[in-house]
Image (cartoon, rainbow, N blue to C red):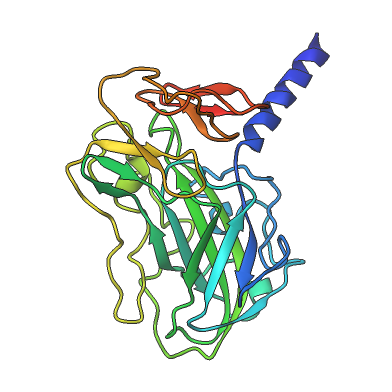
Amino acid sequence: MKGLLSVAALSLAVSEVSGHYIFQQLTTGGTQHPVFKYIRKNSNYNSPVTDLSSNDLRCNVGASGAGTETVTVQAGDSFTFTLDTPVYHQGPVSIYMSKAPGKASDYDGSGGWFKIKDWGPTISGGSASWTLSGSYTAQIPTCIPSGDYLIRIQNIGIHNPWPAGIPQFYLSCAQVTVVNGGNGNPGPTVSIPGAFKETDPGYTANIYSNFNSYTVPGPAVFSCNGGGPNPNPTTSSTTTARPTTTLVTSTRTSSAPTTTSSTPSGCTVAKWGQCGGMNWTGCTTCAAGSTCTVSNQHYSQCL
């Protein structure tokens, strides 16, 4: 019996972990590089980090510069992070950079971090949507000094509302050498850990109740034109969204609690997609090979 219980527990753990995702591939100069060639490989597969005081919030669990190569990029050039599985947990995606005092491969990320990109929700006309995708593209600021940097991307999954649930950080760091940079002084800078707190409204937000506005956690986004605020739309909407595709979500309202509503005829949900939960009005039938599994009252997923 003990052996059977152990096998069952292991099976459940594998199932839970396989439902997550990791930023594992970098594209620069139009070339998509091999998995983890320039991205630090973590040791916790695709599980999230949840401890706000942990150094793992910098580049992920077990992720160091050892064995990771550094790619040269031009200031002003675009780059892309690609995941093993598209992001499907509602929440913001942000990109940070931190200049290494020497080689990027030797840098532990203990210095200052500045933010260069946010993808927050769009809240308008009684609905909200998130940019949930299989890849995210941003641009190296043209004015930052040349040198070695870590580029850090994170998605904060806020699908399990605080305090009953804990937001989940999915993150990775790439190692780059920026050339032909400028003499800018990027900021504001923050320390990681330390940049995110349990009192941050973007951390404590409940996307299922009275979700009228949202502030992406962390500092303002740096711009070579003098910086600027985070793009955090504010409206009187009380709705949120959840995708069944790899890009932008469809919307659902957050009114009286129900488990399911009328479901479009003949539709199916791809594996890892949402199939139910409070006020869910989308498809409830999972594609072959997956089953609709309850995570909490707000969210069921095809696993």
Q: Residue at x 41, y 52 (%)?
A: 196
Identify the residue shown where x is 59% and y is 63%.
Answer: 173
Task: Check the image and name the residue furthest to the front.
Answer: 266
Give coordinates of residue 68: x percent, y percent. 73, 67
On the image, the x and y values in percent for residue 33 come to 70, 68
Q: Position of residue 175 (x, y in %)?
A: 63, 71
Q: Is 77 drawn above or below residue 229 in the view shown? A: below
Name above or below for residue 44 compared with residue 273: below
Give the farthest residue toward the top: 1
In the image: residue 269, left or right of residue 32: left
Q: Position of residue 92 (x, y in %)?
A: 41, 51
Q: In which quarter of the view is residue 278 placed?
A: top left
Total number of numbered labels? 0
Q: Is residue 185 left or right of residue 253?
A: right
**Which residue occupies the foreground of this view, 51 or 248?**
248
* Residue ID at (30%, 46%): 201
Residue at image point 71% right, 21% down: 9
Q: Quadrant of the N terminus?
A: top right
- Could one spot residue 226 in this view of the protein? yes
Question: Which quarter of the figure is the C terminus placed in?
Answer: top right
Instruction: Please tell me whether residue 190 is drawn above or below residue 87 in the rendered image.
Output: below
Relative to 213, residue 148 above or below: below
Q: Is residue 55 visible?
A: no
